[in-house]
Amino acid sequence: MSDDYQTRTDAGSVVVVLGRAAPSETRLRIKTPAFWDRFTNAELVDYDVAMQHDPSASNAQQKAAARLRIFRRDASDAGFVNLAKNRVVAFVQGLEGGVLQVGRAATILGAAITDDEVA
Amino acid sequence: MSVLTQFTGGERLSSIVGAPVTSSSMQNLYPAAGATAALSGAMTAATLKTALSITGRGRINWAAIYCNDATARTLRMKITVDGSVIRDTTSASISTANSGFVGLGGGFYNGTFATAVFYQPVRFGESLLIEIASSVSETDKATFAYAYEVFV
């Protein structure tokens, strides 16, 4: 058995069980600045460009840009981002193929929230 | 034949009927069940890994598995009692942190607190084995929670 396990004898029974305690509280909220720090500089530039209002753009493109602005404003107002919230997950995943390369959403959403990042 | 099976006529649980209870906010549910939680450690995609193995006599009351982040994955729990598989369940795809299912027992979290938790005691006379798996190769992205008792 690996280090994942603990083995003990209990009332004559031999118990082998996963032994590394789960965190008492799973961290879900990350400070807004720490959230944006998870993006690379190039990704942030692309995000900023994509969220600009362009009056000559199609209605769909203007709405897509508005969604980016709304998310940034909401995150700023709240001061934190809940990485487990379905709307946040869908939004970040939706950035793939545009602002983000495929696979980046999982990295941004899935990395453990550190002591410095937790909100 | 063990002492237990000798005097109980050798009855063995064949299988558990019904589907496991699924829930979000599992990190708030398991403490209400008096359960202990442990990280999964390293798991290889779609490969069962021992979560709890007991050689002896006892009773498993509650067992659950849930994911620790929002990566889309399925989770599986296989429960073997005295050599017989009584439950082998794989979840639908889960992409919400702290969501999973209660493989044995049940419970409900209403968003503020656990309003109900129930045990589903299953006795074992010789051995208990609970294995878990994820559809994704990963480390410590799942949590296994359990509550058991052993008999003298």
Image (spheres, grey):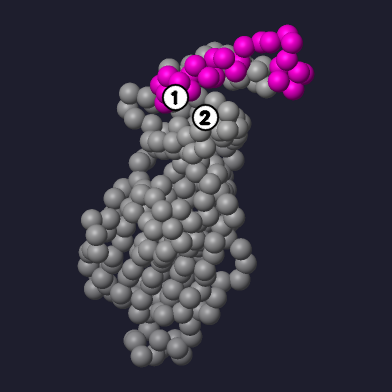
Q: Examine the structure image and report whether residue A54 is included in the region drawn in magenta.
A: yes
For the residues labelled 2 and 1, the Cα–Cα distance comes to 9 Å
The residue pinned by badge 1 equals A39
SS assignment at label 2: loop
Query: Label 2 neighbourhood size at 10 Å, few (<14), some (14-19), many (20+)?
Result: many
Please tell me which residue lies in front, B143 or B18.
Answer: B143
Mark 2 residue type:
Leu
Relative to B53, A106 lies left or right: right
* Nearer the camera: disc 2 or disc 1: 2
Residue A100 has which mark?
2
**Image point 38% across, 72% down: which residue?**
B128
Overall secondary structure of the magenta stretch?
Answer: helix
Q: What is the quadrant of residue A42 in the picture?
A: top left
Asked if badge 2 and badge 1 are on a common chain, one would say yes
Residue B82 % position (x, y): 41, 79
Chain part drawn in magenta = A34-63
Relative to B55, A40 lies left or right: right
Judge whether A84 appears above or below B29 on screen. Answer: above
Mark 1 residue type:
Phe
